[in-house]
Image (cartoon, grey):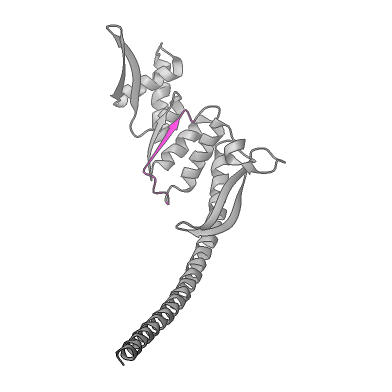
Amino acid sequence: AEKKAAADANKSVVKKINASVEKTTLGDIAGLAELKAQMQTLYAAAKEAAEKLTQSRLKGFAAMNKEMKAALEFLNMPGIRFALKHTRGPLSSHGQDTVEFLISTNPGEEPKPLAKIASGGELSRIMLAFKSALADRDALPTVIYDEIDSGVAAGRIGQLLHQTARGHQVLCITHTPQVAAFADNQLLIQKNVRKDRTFTEIHTLDMDGRVEVLARMISGDKVSELSLASARELIEKSK
């Protein structure tokens, strides 16, 4: 009798355990199904938002491309053609887009990757055109250019740098007076040797100092009244 009672008790316990396991399993399945449904809903919403972002980006590139073309023509780089290689990929924190800028620098040539086709000087001018086109929308606080005026109309470079500086801090290293004349603040960087050691010094220039330095850029070490007058004229015209 005791054995039968123990067996019945064991059966009862096993039955309760099986019922509990079945209930838990069914509950987990229901929970997983609910989570999967939520995931699908959220994915659909994210995909829709990503597609809106894609369309906004493509529209923005079309508008920027027009401004870029105008800026590059102003910088004596006519005939340049930009294109965008765009593909949709997996969703990420930045959307679904993979893009590559393509450029053709000569008429009749198919656009190729910007990083492979443009020379150093061209890249500098293209970057300046980018910053000019994005002047009121780019959050980058400081832009640095080194000898960007090489081989092009320097006065136009100076104008575009000055325009870009309305929305950014622009630091430009130049040996060209037509560019330096557009500066809001001009610094002179020079090396001096003292006691067999070389020191690099930076000096802030006042107006007289600017005229003197620009005159030296124009005529070399021998500053003349004519070069001083030309320097004053450059600064006056840049305002």
Asked whether, in this view, residue 221 is left or right of residue 59, the answer is: left
Q: Residue at x 54, y 43 (%)?
A: 71
> Does residue 59 appear in this view?
no
Q: Residue at x 57, y 47 (%)?
A: 100
Question: Looking at the image, how many numbered discs can be counted on the residues?
Answer: 0
Toward the viewer: 158 or 105?
A: 105
Residue at the extreme top of the image, as rendered: 195
Q: Which quarter of the image is occupied by the N terminus?
A: bottom left
Q: Position of residue 170 (x, y in %)?
A: 39, 37
Q: Quadrant of residue 194?
A: top left
Residue at the extreme right of the image, as rendered: 108
Q: Position of residue 46 (x, y in %)?
A: 48, 67
Toward the viewer: 94 or 2?
A: 2
Residue at the extreme bottom of the image, as rendered: 1
Q: Position of residue 224 (x, y in %)?
A: 40, 13
Q: Quadrant of residue 175?
A: top left
Q: Which quarter of the image is occupied by the C terminus?
A: top left
Q: Position of residue 138 (x, y in %)?
A: 42, 49
Q: Residue at x 47, y 39 (%)?
A: 160
Q: Examine the rendered structure and indicate whether residue 181 appears above or below residue 1.
A: above
Asked if residue 154 lies in the magenta stretch, the reply is no
Asked whether, in this view, residue 20 is left or right of residue 150, the answer is: left
Q: Examine the rendered structure and indicate whether residue 62 appears above or below residue 236.
A: below
Toward the viewer: 131 or 17?
A: 17
Asked whether, in this view, residue 104 is left or right of residue 7, the answer is: right
Q: Give the magenta range.
A: 137-148
Asked if residue 143 lies in the magenta stretch, the reply is yes
> Does residue 42 appear in this view?
yes
Q: Examine the rendered structure and indicate whether residue 114 appears above or below residue 203.
A: below
Q: Residue at x 35, y 22 (%)?
A: 189
